[in-house]
Amino acid sequence: MPATEQPRDAALRERARRVVPGGMTGHLHAAMLPPGYPQFFASGSGCRLVDVDGREFVDFMCAWGPNLLGYRHPEVEAAAARQQALGDCLNGPGERFVELAERLVDQVAHADWAMFQKNGTDATTVALTIARAATGRRKVLVARRAYHGAAPWCTPAPAGVTAEDRAHLVNVTYNDVGSVEAACDEVGADLAAIIVTPHRHELGTEQQPVDPAFARRLRELCDRAGAALVLDEVRTGLRIDPAGSWESLGIRPDLAAWSKTIANGHALAAVTGTDALRDAATRIFTTGSFWCGAVAMAAGVATLDIVAREDVVGHLGRIGGLLREGLASQSVSHGVPVRQSGPVQMPLVLFEDDADFAKGTLFCAEALARGAYLHPRHNMFLSLAHTEADIDRALVATDAAFAAVAARFSHT
């Protein structure tokens, strides 16, 4: 359905432009997506989204990651409703605060304690604050182009950011041991932390698995310097391994930042850490009026209960594998090469010879018109709610989308 046939969405965009700068902020801005994508939604259930004009989609963004179990998972929503009936934002946290921290400490391999926030940016910022408090140092190593949030120290947009906001960040290259060793030599005794994502997942670039030798060297360098290794699990948490995404490598961080999945769509974030950093975490002052909202914490307890009970990672791997295999087959049959990268739980599809993303944009627009919500540049997400039937339905849409790309670009 063309954008001109979305009257409610168009009307809401016009109203928003009058009262919201730009009509929308940040990564949720539909202006960054192909024509026809909705800005406003009416409902979500399982892996299905319905926009304000009544169009239903099999969704592969899961609200940009948070809905690990699917939209409005009954068990999670029941727990949230029970807590909502008692209260949410109170003078202090409810009982679920302690219960959720206990669950995280039991589940996360490196964790001796947990602290709660609301967004991923909160968690990454708190983690670095703890590292600096513990070490009394300033410098933080961070991979070029890595996304760690939207605060001035890490936002990808330069507007309003000063050089002083990033004066103590030192850029390194992901999976390049030499660049990290050189940076450590450069900062010397002022190294507070290295912050890193479990795998490379930059916008518009192929996802890249971590080189185990790189991960091990980061651990060694932090140990040698007395610095903190911070793992940014905001996007990956619970999708790769509930105990921590580097557990299979035998490498544990000192601190980890969590958000998105840990309350299945309810606003919640957390930092987990080791006993060595407990005192520093106690000494910093970090807070928010809504950070201890009891409803999100009740949802978090229910989410972690489900993750502990069901093989969520296994399901995501199986369903993600079916999607990847189907897309690969269609790519070959239509003669349209693509590059699929990253864990199958977090699929990314990029087209060959598509520097301006014209092929990806057409592909996603055509798939959307047939009921599959994909993204042309950002990694996508699978949920526990996705079934084989949902993958089959999506592949019908993508088959037609591949045909459209082949028809338009076959002469190039």
Image (cartoon, helix red, strand yellow):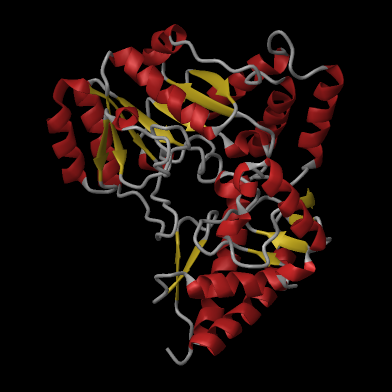
Relative to 341, 140 lies left or right: left
Relative to 252, 114 lies left or right: right
Picture quadrant of residue 208: bottom left
How many labels sit on residues?
0
- Can you name the residue that lies furthest to the front here? 18
Relative to 399, 122 lies left or right: left
Q: Indicate whether 386 appears above or below 144.
A: below
Relative to 374, 128 lies left or right: left
Quarter holding the C terminus is bottom left
Whether residue 286 appears in this view of the structure is yes
Q: Position of residue 255 (x, y in %)?
A: 41, 26
Q: Position of residue 5 (x, y in %)?
A: 78, 69
Q: Indicate whether 109 appears above or below 88.
A: below
Q: Indicate whether 364 appears above or below 307.
A: below
Residue nearest the viewer, comparing 366 with 21: 21
Q: Indicate whether 203 appears above or below 323.
A: above
Residue at horizontal 39 percent and vertical 70 percent from the top: 355
Residue nearest the viewer, comparing 246 with 352: 352
- Can you name the residue that lies furthest to the right here? 85
Residue at horizontal 39 percent and vertical 77 percent from the top: 353
- Can you name the residue that lies furthest to the bottom here? 411
Residue at horizontal 70 percent and vertical 59 percent from the top: 38
Q: Position of residue 239 (x, y in %)?
A: 55, 45
Q: Position of residue 243 (x, y in %)?
A: 50, 34
Residue at horizontal 38 percent and vertical 15 percent from the top: 277
